[in-house]
Image (cartoon, rainbow, N blue to C red):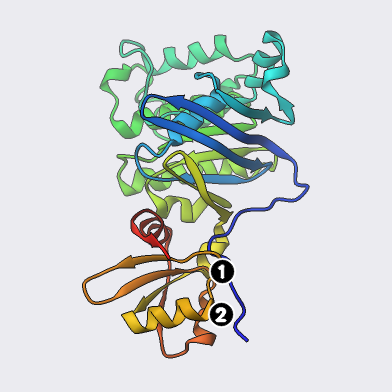
Amino acid sequence: MISKTPALPFMDIGDEPCDLHVSSVTKHYDGFTLNSVSLDVPRGSVVGLIGQNGAGKTTLMKSILGTVHIDGGSIELFGRNVASLSQNELVELRNRLCFVGAVTAYPNVMTVTEVAHMYQFAFRSFDQAAYEQFATRMGLLPSSAGKKVKDLSRGMGMKLQLACTLACGADLAILDEPTAGLDPIVREEVLDILREWMEDDRHSALISSHITTDLEKIADYLVFIENGQVIMSCERDAIDMMGIAHLRSAELERVLADGLIADRAYVLRHDLSYDMLVTNRAAFLRTYPDYVCDRASIDDVMVLLVKGEVR
């Protein structure tokens, strides 16, 4: 008897405490809808948010940050529904949240030191010693202390954001493409800093990135958004269990007829063969030892989910 495997996994965190809980959030724009999106960021974890440009990742992050008004659903920060809070309570809660964007949005005429002073005024919990430690390690201090934002490279601008935001005493970091456009060495430095920040189990992070190799190194969970909907969420290790089966037409028809894949199968057609997403590569190869099924990367999974057809 063939044991069926689910088409796609969805994360179940049980009773774990969450610093962020998004439930059925909807936001309508002309031509696009963020459609009933739900996700959790368990305390002490990194959740990687993946998907194509225009899939809804930035809209979701803006909804979490409160810069756009949602049309439906709810958002909880640190166990409290933000819609039920007074303005003072909301400000207090959002002080435990920090944001790093893909673009360094500080005024161009400000110097590195002036940006840090701005954070001191904005955040009561800003730790000047921690900022100096981060900034020195990342090469911002002392050499670039007087440099203006407009004169910073893409990498140095990202390091300035990280040094400032991680020194704010926040418990939850929202990062939108933090390593985009950085060379491999700077990217690794940024990831090292985030890893060290995460060593404190009270810190959590939601990271959007197109560089899936970075998420393979740092994420505990992955959430995939396509066309404004979450179509897969899982522990990072679940990707290691997946495979891409390379099948001829007759082989594909046999697998589909056998019903190994429960619910639906994601299949990408090529000129002379088909690729099929397999959520349990080991089980597939036990059932079909003569078929080819390679290990899947995050990129492989994304391609099948976006370009493949559902059978």
Where is residue 102? Give x, y as percent: 38, 31
The residue closer to the viewer here, 239 or 75, is 75
Q: Residue at x 50, y 27 (%)?
A: 27
- Farthest-out residue, front: 257
**In this figure, which residue is indicated by the disc labeled 1?**
262
Specify whether residue 104 is in view. Answer: yes
Q: Residue at x 55, y 64 (%)?
A: 263
Callout 2: few (<14), some (14-19), or many (20+) C-alpha neighbours within 10 Å? some
Question: For numbered disc 1, what is the local secondary structure?
Answer: loop
- Farthest-out residue, left: 271
All told, the count of numbered labels is 2
**In this figure, which residue is indicated by the disc labeled 2?**
283
Where is residue 262? Give x, y as percent: 56, 69
Residue 40 appears in which quarter of the rendering?
top right
Q: Is residue 305 above or below residue 76?
A: below
Q: Name the amino acid, label 1.
A: Ala
Q: Which image quarter is the N terminus in?
A: bottom right
The residue closer to the viewer here, 199 or 34, is 34
Q: Residue at x 65, y 38 (%)?
A: 203
Specify whether residue 132 is in view. Answer: no
